[in-house]
Image (cartoon, helix red, strand yellow):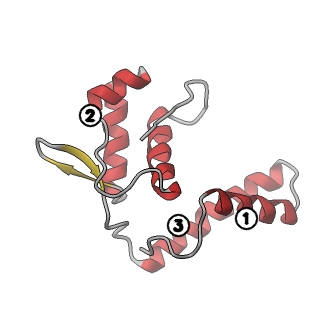
Amino acid sequence: MLIRINPQSPEPLFEQVVFAVKSAVAKGTAVAGEKLPSVRDLARELAINPNTVVRAYEVLERDGVIVRRQGAGCFLSDRGSDLAQSEKKKQLVLLLRHAVTEAFHLGFQPDDVKKALAQCLDELQFDGKRRQS
């Protein structure tokens, strides 16, 4: 799995790592059971502090994206999020509301936002048959 970060981005580094892993899973380029690099290896590869990687892995574990196996490392989970469906829907609405608000302030019209969302779904090759969690 290729994890890239942008040190110039205003987004915190640990959040970039989290998004990179979640994106790889969503795109299907990373699969359940796949082992993630060790904290030290990933920190060295990305030239970041190991504590940053630890924080990212903690978030990924909390979100149910990875599981830690003592002495073996971190692996992509196959169980998905443990959140109740109603809570996941609330989070989805919050994420989309945030994105739509930002798009409005950038000057985009509703049709532009709809097209951009469709493009993002197409890029993930979302076909409705992906893991339903």
**Residue that label 1 marks:** 118
- For discs 2 and 3, the disc positioned in front in the rendered view: 2
Image quadrant where one finds the C terminus: bottom left
Image quadrant where one finds the N terminus: top left
Q: Is residue 8 left or right of residue 55?
A: right
Q: Rounded to the nearest whole Å, what is the CA distance between mark 2 and mark 3?
A: 30 Å
* Residues packed near mark 2 inside 10 Å, few (<14), some (14 to 19) or many (20 plus): some
Q: Secondary structure at mark 2?
A: loop
Q: Residue at x 59, y 67 (%)?
A: 126
Give the image location of residue 29, x and y in percent. 47, 51
Q: Is residue 116 left or right of residue 109?
A: left
Q: Rounded to the nearest whole Å, what is the CA distance between mark 1 and mark 3?
A: 19 Å
Q: Secondary structure at mark 3?
A: helix
**Residue that label 2 marks:** 38
Question: Hey, what amino acid is under mark 2?
Answer: Ser
**Residue that label 3 marks:** 91
Give the image location of residue 64, x and y in percent. 33, 60
Question: Hey, what amino acid is under mark 1?
Answer: Ala
Q: Earlier in the sequence, mark 2 or mark 3?
A: 2
Checking the image for residue 62, the label placed there is none
Q: Residue at x 57, y 36 (%)?
A: 11
Q: Tell me where residue 40 sits by quadrant.
A: top left
Give the image location of residue 86, x and y in percent. 47, 79
Q: Rounded to the nearest whole Å, what is the CA distance between mark 2 and mark 1?
A: 35 Å
Give the image location of residue 14, x and y in percent. 44, 37
Question: Hey, what amino acid is under mark 3?
Answer: Gln
Question: Which residue lies most toward the bottom here?
Answer: 86
Q: Is residue 105 above or below residue 92?
A: above
